[in-house]
Image (cartoon, rainbow, N blue to C red):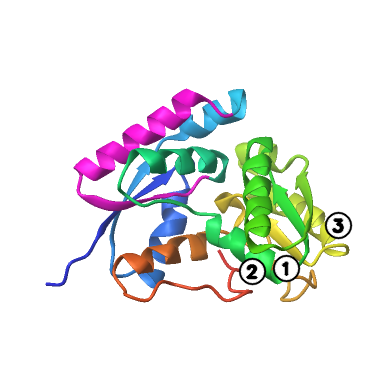
Amino acid sequence: MSHRPRVCVLHTVAGLPAVFAPLLDELAPGVDPYHVVDESLLADTVAHGPLPRTTARLAAYVTHAEAAGAEAVLVTCSSIGPAAEQTRALTALPVLRVDEPMADTAVRTGSRIGVLATLDSTLAPTAGLVARKAAAAGTRITLDTTVCPGAYAARAAGDQGRHDALIAEEARRLAADHDVLVLAQASMADALAALPDGALGVPVLTSPRTGVAQLVSLYEETPYEETPYEETARP
């Protein structure tokens, strides 16, 4: 039997394993994933901002993953993306940010980039990542960010329909003046699925597909490279 690299997929939202499991089967069938959920990592970040203890706790999860035989850790929460990067200095394991390929794609797709989130805690990490990718590529961009008003509260109350409608409203507003839109959180990936194809007139990028596809490089010689619009209107 061929070797299947074990991968720890770390979530901070309880519903995300169900989103990522089919994507792992589809896009990275050569890995052996297991899921870990700790909602308190996100709760602490929302309540208090980036904390050294959050980075330390994430580093502990990486240590546990290595002890479990994992060959990589995929962090699916953009809010703790900076903490994921900081842990890289503490381990030999690849620690992957789910939104990094999305940020690369956004910079290649257009110079006027709109970033949508439902949490303030996600905007700065995602916008900062996009800005760094642009600087590294030598690309000049304009970057606008928005927290879709009321969307997080609607989801927390169990009203997924209102959550999606509020995100769609903000997306329509930004689409008129931007070349590409970025949905900062993995939990937003399906929010625009009900819109007709091409309804916004610009690409809309989400993180789960290309975030998972990074894992292909663990078992294939040729690393995965996403196409410019691969993430549009898909989770």
Q: Given this view, does label 3 or label 1 mark the residue nearer the observer?
A: 3
Disc 2 to disc 1, how far (Cα)?
9 Å
Quadrant (top left, top right, bottom left, bottom right) of the C terminus? bottom right
Contact between marks 2 and 1 (CB within 8 A): the answer is yes
Label disc, if present, on residue 168 of the rendered structure: none
Please determine whether, in this image, residue 159 is positioned above or below residue 2.
above
- Label 2 belongs to which residue? 233
Frontmost residue, 30 versus 23: 30
Instruction: Rate crowding at label 1 as few (under 14), some (14 to 19) or many (20 or more) other CA atoms within 10 Å.
Output: few
Instruction: From the viewer's perspective, tell me whether residue 49 is left or right of residue 217.
Output: right
- Please tell me which residue is depicted at 46% across the width and 42% down the height of the picture: 84
**Residue 85 on image: x %, y %:** 47, 43
Which quadrant does the N terminus fall into? Answer: bottom left
Q: Quadrant of residue 113?
A: bottom right
Q: Secondary structure at mark 2?
A: loop
Q: Outermost residue toward the left? A: 1
**Span colored in magenta:** 50-77
Check if residue 61 falls in the magenta segment: yes
Look at the numbered disc 3 and give the secondary structure of its residue.
helix
Residue 131 within the magenta-colored segment of the rendering? no
> Marks 2 and 1: which is nearer the front?
2
Residue at the spot of label 1:
195
Q: Residues within 10 Å of mark 3 (few under 14, many from 20)?
A: few
Mark 2 and mark 1 lie on one chain; the one further toward the N terminus is: 1
What is the secondary structure assignment of the residue under circle 1?
loop
Residue 224 visible in this rendered orientation of the protein: yes
In this figure, what is the number of numbered marks? 3
Horizontal side of 130 relative to 235 (left or right) equals right
Residue ID at (41%, 39%) = 87
